[in-house]
Amino acid sequence: MDHKIKNIGTPEGRILIFGGVYSNLQALEKLKRIAEQEGIPASNCICTGDIVGYCAQPQETVDLFRKWNPHSIAGNVEIQLAEGKEDCGCDFKEGSRCDNFSQLWYPYAKSKLSKDATAWMKTLPDHLEFIYANKKFTVVHGAFDHVSEFIFKSTPWAKKEETFNATGSDVIIAGHCGIPFTHNLGGRSWINPGVIGMPANNGSPQVWYAILDAKQPGLVAHHSFKYHHKLASGLMRQNYLPEEYARTLRTGIWDNTEILPVNESRMRNLNFL
């Protein structure tokens, strides 16, 4: 498998990392304001992919993302849309609830996006790499060799090591699984900042991102924020998108936990960090 890797050099200052916008325009608008209030330029903001997804405003979300212009890799959704595929490539089990829901939101997103938007998705790299705090970082969506692999904090370290070894990295920044966490072992770190398009199944509608700061102990701090989630949920309902996902935006509880390992399926608090 060929990997399109973009090197973004040696960023200075704080770096804001996030994932899974999922067509949630209201969440993206709020995160952009947070970055501006924190004095973090777009050139120091990094997305782990899946800019498009479950929510109601895919084109508007892509338009704002491109206007803001943070770095991003292609998530499985961007790859599938760019290639004109008929499914999201999320690696959901066939016939599962998530798979059935994707047969509603994915065609909707595909129908709403302009040819220019999908052409832009083709330009996104598979991975980013950079040097920060004297460490090599690589950004992946799921894992290095499997864009839609679900990697959680409880996922065995041996599985994470495959990506560390393939990239020669000290730190991996990943997305896809929807749950924020940092897992440190043997001088290496796997960081998932979480997603901003859906809450983290912890009973709060707030959504998650993280900030890297070379001047702070531990290097990474996870953060959550409130946004106009009722509007985002209402727009999903108006457009006949899955009610179960619209409800999750309001309650902070996932409709099901079929993608989650046992440990994460039991966590509805901040223990996932």
Image: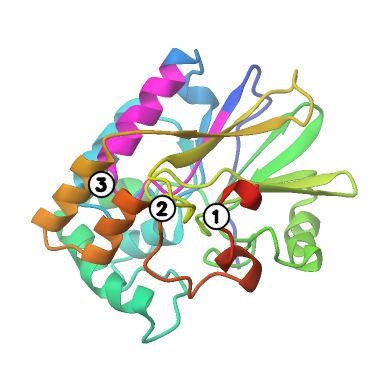
Residue 155 bears which disc, if any?
none
49 is higher (above) or lower (below) than 30: below
> For the residue carrying disc 3, how many other residues have a C-alpha within 10 Å: few (<14), some (14-19), or many (20+)?
some
Residue in front for this viewpoint, 71 or 226: 226
Q: What residue type is labelled 2?
A: Asp
Q: How far apart are marks 3 and 1 (CA)?
A: 20 Å
Q: Name the residue under label 3.
A: 117
Residue drawn at x 26%, y 35% as measured from the top left = 228
Q: What residue type is labelled 1?
A: His
163 lies left or right of 14: right
User: Quarter holding the N terminus?
Assistant: bottom right
Q: How far apart are marks 1 and 2 (CA)?
A: 8 Å
Q: Mark 2 points at which residue?
A: 50
Q: Is residue 208 magenta?
A: no
> Which quarter of the picture shows residue 221?
top right
Q: Name the residue under label 1.
A: 141
- Give the magenta range: 16-36
Label 1: which secondary element: loop
Q: Which of marks 1 and 2 is nearer the N terminus?
A: 2
Q: In the image, residue 244 lies at what x, y percent?
A: 27, 65
Instruction: Find the residue positioned furthest to the right.
Output: 186
8 is higher (above) or lower (below) than 35: below
Q: How many labels does the image show?
A: 3
Residue drawn at x 79%, y 63% as measured from the top left = 157
Q: Which of marks 2 and 3 is nearer the N terminus?
A: 2
131 lies left or right of 34: right
Residue drawn at x 15%, y 54% as measured from the top left = 112
Q: In the image, residue 245 lies at what x, y percent?
A: 29, 61
Q: In the image, residue 24 lies at what x, y percent?
A: 29, 45
